[in-house]
């Protein structure tokens, strides 16, 4: 039974990211939705005086993020406000609400108890604390005490009475539950849920006439509520109103048939289509998503994914058609406007794309991806100053946005500020070491500033991740020759020729065959190819990296860990390799070894959100929830999108 919600009143070669396009990328803002058992709004902004003070600005920003289901960002804002006023009960209250929604119930309890310590007469905080406690198995009575305090401090708090009723109902105390539900329904008579529960309690108490009245009211308030219609039908059958009962049960059957927003067959097709899209199988994705459209009520969701699939295929007209249909059906669709803007940008219609991104920001002023794409439109118009400002805003909202760092680096480079652009390229490559194109550009900027050794190091690392990339190869070899490292340049030539089949024109090399198998998810064949190459050239670490990733992808975590370990021995200071090794060990059940590798990875790169998150998983496996949550919070401070497992 549900306690009421309310208040009184993708990458190749490593394991911890996914590959993304280097320029504009189609995204789904909502992604995989998180469903919360409870929700609790924050105190309204009009309760906050002296809004010119920084901490109140942070409070408002935090409230905004909470209302947009971004509790990670909200927590960061409330934490900042709390530094300025550590004893402010409203800040503590909002922090507690955000922590509960994010998934840290212990932290939420601590924040809410602190709020109540500074303001004991705070019914909202008692209600919120009651929700935290009632959500824990065996803690219903603790929640009950908080709900009773909320009701005592604010007798008009309908939600408190409702939750008291729920707990009494769970305890099989029908009479007390009935009193609480009656009070809640009386205070909030327009709530179908309150009237429904009151009606159910009346029916259980044998007061059928009163129960029928309440259930009829619930159905009028929410005609789509199947439970209300079903309970009403049962009452009518018990009171001898057989015709009414039959009509009501037919309504229940009709609601049952239409309640699923996506029928089982459509849901299956949609899931398969999205999976195919994630794996780069655009043709299959289009087929499955087209099939998913039949009979679904989530047309906008399916068409958005279908539009993305057509864009990935290169059929921009079909992509635009699908996304325009999304917006026609729902003009407030953020995903529709955002992805339509991306398609328009690819079509060269920069001004229309800009309009779409502006629309996104009018709907959600805190959406980092919209600032990123809008910055790209300004860069396309060579409006460097505005482009840089927009990209900086995107980074401020999402500091882990690697593509925004790359884009800002490009803007600064193209506007002539080649020195300032270096740090953004550097950060981007740290955030996502698999950004080969970014590393290619980064090396060129370094070379232009006579930093040839640094350029060689960047290109050498990139070539290990994409050994068949001709631009990287030629850039690296030319730089090596220029630096007087002819022997090393010759070694790179031999390696590239061997891996790309340059000595056998028209014939695909064994390495290239492996990459092709990997692309089509034929992992066993890919492993065979990579192992074949390594038998001949065991020192080719770029091939071993592909082998490790492929072994992980097919679920052979021990084999993946073995290959990553060999790479770590060669490059012990590579944080990314140690992180991948730690993940493989953790998946393979070697928790203690995983912990050692992850701790070393974090020593090398303390700013790795993935590293902190994976270490948190290790602590969870060791049943050390306190340390686990501390690591999840550290990951969240780096990347606000991260939440604890299961949220």
Image (spheres, rainbow, N blue to C red):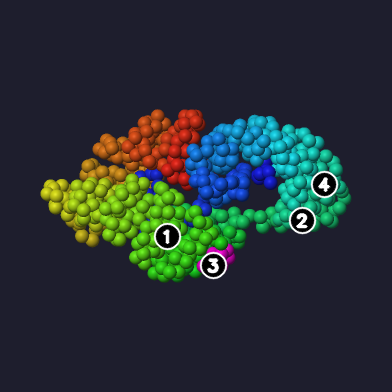
* Secondary structure type for disc 1: helix
Whether residue 356 sits left or right of residue 518 in the image: it is right
Image coordinates of residue 492 in percent, x first then y, are 18, 50
Whether residue 245 sits left or right of residue 508 in the image: it is right
Q: Earlier in the sequence, mark 2 or mark 3?
A: 2
The residue singled out by tag 1 in the image is 373
Q: Are marks 3 and 4 in contact (CB under 8 Å)?
A: no
452 and 166: which one is in front?
Answer: 452
The residue singled out by tag 2 in the image is 220
Q: Earlier in the sequence, mark 3 or mark 4?
A: 4
536 and 351: which one is in front?
Answer: 351
Q: Residues within 10 Å of mark 2 (few under 14, many from 20)?
A: some
Distance from the alpha carbon under mark 1 to that under mark 4: 55 Å
If the image is split into quadrants, where does the N terminus sit?
top right
575 lies above or below 257: above
122 lies above or below 388: above
The stretch of residues the image draws in magenta is 324-331
The residue singled out by tag 4 in the image is 211
Whether residue 113 sits left or right of residue 168 in the image: it is left
Q: Residues within 10 Å of mark 1 (few under 14, many from 20)?
A: many
**For discs 1 and 3, the disc positioned in front in the rendered view:** 1
Distance from the alpha carbon under mark 3 to that under mark 4: 45 Å
Q: Earlier in the sequence, mark 1 or mark 4?
A: 4
361 lies above or below 207: below
* Secondary structure type for disc 4: helix
Residue at the image point whose x is 52% and y is 57% from the top:
364
């Amino acid at each position: 039974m549900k306690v009421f919600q309310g208040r009184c009143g993708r990458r190749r070669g490593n394991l911890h990211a996914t590959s993304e396009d280097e320029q504009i990328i189609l995204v789904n803002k909502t992604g995989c939705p998180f469903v919360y058992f409870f929700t609790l709004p924050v105190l309204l902004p009009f309760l906050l005086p002296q809004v010119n003070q920084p901490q109140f600005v942070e409070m408002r920003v935090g409230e905004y993020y909470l209302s947009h289901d971004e509790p990670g960002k909200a927590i960061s804002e409330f934490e900042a406000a709390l530094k300025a006023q550590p004893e402010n009960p409203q800040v503590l209250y909002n922090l507690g609400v955000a922590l509960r929604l994010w998934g840290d119930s212990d932290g939420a309890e601590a924040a809410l108890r602190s709020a109540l310590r500074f303001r004991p007469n705070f019914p909202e905080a008692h209600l919120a604390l009651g929700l935290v406690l009632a959500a824990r198995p065996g803690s219903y009575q603790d929640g009950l005490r908080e709900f009773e305090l909320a009701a005592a401090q604010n007798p008009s708090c309908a939600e408190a009475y409702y939750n008291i009723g729920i707990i009494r109902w769970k305890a099989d105390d029908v009479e007390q539950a009935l009193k609480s539900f009656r009070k809640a329904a009386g205070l909030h008579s327009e709530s179908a849920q309150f009237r429904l529960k009151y009606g159910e309690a009346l029916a259980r108490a044998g007061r059928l006439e009163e129960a029928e009245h309440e259930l009829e009211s619930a159905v009028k308030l929410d005609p789509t509520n199947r439970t209300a219609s079903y309970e009403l039908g049962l009452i009518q059958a018990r009171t001898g109103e057989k015709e009414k009962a039959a009509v009501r049960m037919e309504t229940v059957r009709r609601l049952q048939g239409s309640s699923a927003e996506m029928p089982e067959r459509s849901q299956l097709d949609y899931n398969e289509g999205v999976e195919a899209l994630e794996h780069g199988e655009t043709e299959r994705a289009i087929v499955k998503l087209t099939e998913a459209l039949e009979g679904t009520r989530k047309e906008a969701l399916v068409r958005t994914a279908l539009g993305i699939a057509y864009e990935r295929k290169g059929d921009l007209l079909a992509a635009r058609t699908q996304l325009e249909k999304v917006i026609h059906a729902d003009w407030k669709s953020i995903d529709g406007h955002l992805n339509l803007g991306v398609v328009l940008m690819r079509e060269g219609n920069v001004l229309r794309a800009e309009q779409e991104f502006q629309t996104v920001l009018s709907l959600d002023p805190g959406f980092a991806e919209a600032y990123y794409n809008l910055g790209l439109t300004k860069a396309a118009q060579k409006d460097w100053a505005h482009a840089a400002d927009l990209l900086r805003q995107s980074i401020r909202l999402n500091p882990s946005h690697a593509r925004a760092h790359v884009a800002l680096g490009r803007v600064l480079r193209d506007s002539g500020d080649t020195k300032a652009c270096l740090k953004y390229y550097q950060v981007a490559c740290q955030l996502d070491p698999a950004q080969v194109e970014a590393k290619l550009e980064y090396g060129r900027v370094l070379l232009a500033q006579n930093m040839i050794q640094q350029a060689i190091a960047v290109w050498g690392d990139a070539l290990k991740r994409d050994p068949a990339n001709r631009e990287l190869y030629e850039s690296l070899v030319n730089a090596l020759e220029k630096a007087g490292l002819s022997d090393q340049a010759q070694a790179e030539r031999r390696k590239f020729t061997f891996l790309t089949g340059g000595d056998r024109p028209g014939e695909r090399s064994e390495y290239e065959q492996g990459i092709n198998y990997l692309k089509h998810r034929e992992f066993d064949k890919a492993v065979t190819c990579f192992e074949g190459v390594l038998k001949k050239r065991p020192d080719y670490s770029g091939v071993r990296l592909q082998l490790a990733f492929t072994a992980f992808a097919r679920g052979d975590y021990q084999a993946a860990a073995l290959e990553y370990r060999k790479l770590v021995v060669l490059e012990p200071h590579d944080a990314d390799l140690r992180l991948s090794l730690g993940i493989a060990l953790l998946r393979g059940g070697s928790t203690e070894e995983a912990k050692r590798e992850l701790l070393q990875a974090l020593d090398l790169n303390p700013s790795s959100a993935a590293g902190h998150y994976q270490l948190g998983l290790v602590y969870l496996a060791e049943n050390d929830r306190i340390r686990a949550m501390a690591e999840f919070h550290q990951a969240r401070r780096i990347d606000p999108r991260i939440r604890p497992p299961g949220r």
